[in-house]
Image (cartoon, coloured by chain):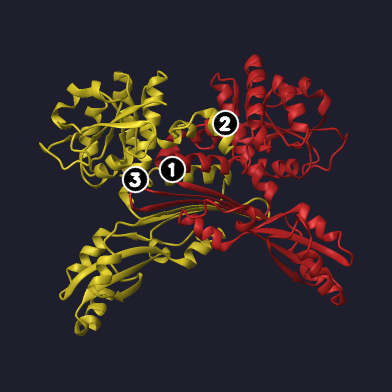
Chain colours: A red, B yellow
Amino acid sequence: MANIRVAIVGYGNLGRSVEKLIGLQPDMTLAGVFSRRDSLDTLDPDTPVLPVADFAAHTGLFDVAVLCLGSATDIPEQAPEFIRHANTVDTYDNHRDVPRHRAEMDKVARENGTVAVVSTGWDPGMFSLNRTIGQALLPGGSQNTFWGPGLSQGHSDALRRIAGVHKAVQYTIPSPDALDAARRGEAGGLTGKQTHLRRCYIVCDEADRERIENEIRTMPDYFVGYEVEVNFIDEATFDAEHTGMPHGGHVITAGDTGGYTQAIEYTLELERNPDFTGAVALAYARAAHRLREAGQSGAYTVLEVAPYLISPDSLDELIARDV
Amino acid sequence: MANIRVAIVGYGNLGRSVEKLIGLQPDMTLAGVFSRRDSLDTLDPDTPVLPVADFAAHTGLFDVAVLCLGSATDIPEQAPEFIRHANTVDTYDNHRDVPRHRAEMDKVARENGTVAVVSTGWDPGMFSLNRTIGQALLPGGSQNTFWGPGLSQGHSDALRRIAGVHKAVQYTIPSPDALDAARRGEAGGLTGKQTHLRRCYIVCDEADRERIENEIRTMPDYFVGYEVEVNFIDEATFDAEHTGMPHGGHVITAGDTGGYTQAIEYTLELERNPDFTGAVALAYARAAHRLREAGQSGAYTVLEVAPYLISPDSLDELIARDV
């Protein structure tokens, strides 16, 4: 089996997930981590830690680099420089800017004979794939994307700013009624406030509960207008059950085929969001390497990659096992 | 927008579904129906009905032919002759024979400069795609395919052979407990009898109910060993609710990413089985035409087709809308 040498660029939550996941792949090894920091607490103390400024000098060490960088400024600023020197995969998630990002990466990749797969992960990424396929199968049908149950960092921060709140998290949850309407193809006109509810878990003194619940329910922008559920729990329960990073969601497409409703639903239920984002990025890192080996260059979204290219198994094995 | 001229070969349930669905596509027209019969009751009386024996003489009329033929003998015997003359899509569903079928179609297609997409539909087809992608994202994870709720023709026939049964249908239904176990990644060792239950709807005289239920529950091969649910209903309810062809199912992949469970689930809920099979075949007919236009030849499974090729929308539109 091939050995694909993978480099990680950036060592936050996503970088650490990718590091862990490389060990689960039958055909990959970790070549090193590029970072701005001099030393990192890597899983394997022998993993090379390299200065990100020296990326271009080390491209002989790896086949593809997974860019585990922020979407706000890092990816748009730095990815076009990395793709000059090596194959890359990113999880750029600024949906509105993806066409520009893909075009820029495509231009530089073609000039330099490299391959980029852009905006992998789950949304964009797997959800994009299911939106395109769903609408292709049921043209004229209705389609809804739901997010959650998932931890919302911004809303959790807002809860923690309320006086008397010791600990708090907020999960965004698809409304069960809206999910059912989407499955019947009847959720076309619903807004985000109608399709999602906000569930809060709060640790505070018992005397503060009524006031805190009232402050949550009347907080503009964050909670007003949403169905809000407030749960008060003790600190031990909070620490045991609410320190993870769960997320997920649904892409639901429903269409009418001349008097009959056909519903397609893709669901993710993720105990750890960055782990799954990293898993998708790694699978497309495999595709980037293979496309380059096949003589291709340029930038690809997940819509443009033949699915068998992301599997560690051979096409013949896949046809015999999965088709 | 392109106009793809589609021919239908065979005019059973699937052929009639494809005929209806072509009218819902923004970029396709029906060029004609090839049949062994001289005349057909087509939706549009002006649709050309052509002798299937003259297929080769009429290839100038269409861009791609959807082979709506049986998998038992028609597809393996006839598809290699059709692909000599024109692009084809089929829904060949003999899973174990797909590698041989693809190889044969690939050889003839390459010799003749045509494109075949083989074994489309939903299983094989969409379920194959989700099996491959699920295992690529979560290598080492567990994966289960569940079928139903769906009408089983063979089991319905067995019920109708019981003395005193006026009307009967049997639906195969995934066991809720097994679905939950699969979502937790704990359904690896379960057999088909443990993961599916059999739900029967029977119309009979009230005096016969106890005997008939006993005959069902003790019928070897068909029902013994399964969880069986027997419902007695009146004829009006039967005619109103149980004459359709519903089907569907789930592909569930669950994997551990170092201490965290990640679950991927793809669900189909189909009110009319042949309509959805036909919808998938038509989307891949679009891909077959485009691959040929791009100068390709050979046979492809759904695993080998870049997803954007099945959409009527342009790649730029898809990237802006779905990614």
Residue A211 to residue B296: above or below = below
Residue A251 in percent (x, y) is at 54, 49
Q: Name the residue rendered at 72%, 41% in the picture.
A: A19
Residue type of the residue flagged with mark 3: Thr
Q: Quadrant of the N terminus of chain A?
A: top right
Q: Is residue B170 left or right of B184 when viewed as pictured? A: left
Residue B233's quadrant in the figure? bottom left
- Pointers 2 and 1 in contact (CB under 8 A)? no
Up/down of B87 relative to A307, above or below: above
Q: Quadrant of the C terminus of chain A?
A: top left
- Viewer-nearest residue: B129 or A179: A179
The chain holding disc 3 is B
Say what secondary structure mark 3 lies in: helix
Can you tell which mark lies on residue A287?
A: 2
Q: Which residue in the structure is indicated by mark 1?
A: A140
- Which residue is identified by label 3? B277
Image x and y of residue B164, in percent? 16, 76
Label 1 crowding class (10 Å Cα cut-off): few <14, some 14-19, many 20+? some
Q: Is residue B255 visible?
A: no
Chain ID, mark 1: A
Toward the bottom, the furthest residue is: B207
Determine if marks 2 and 1 fall on one subunit: yes
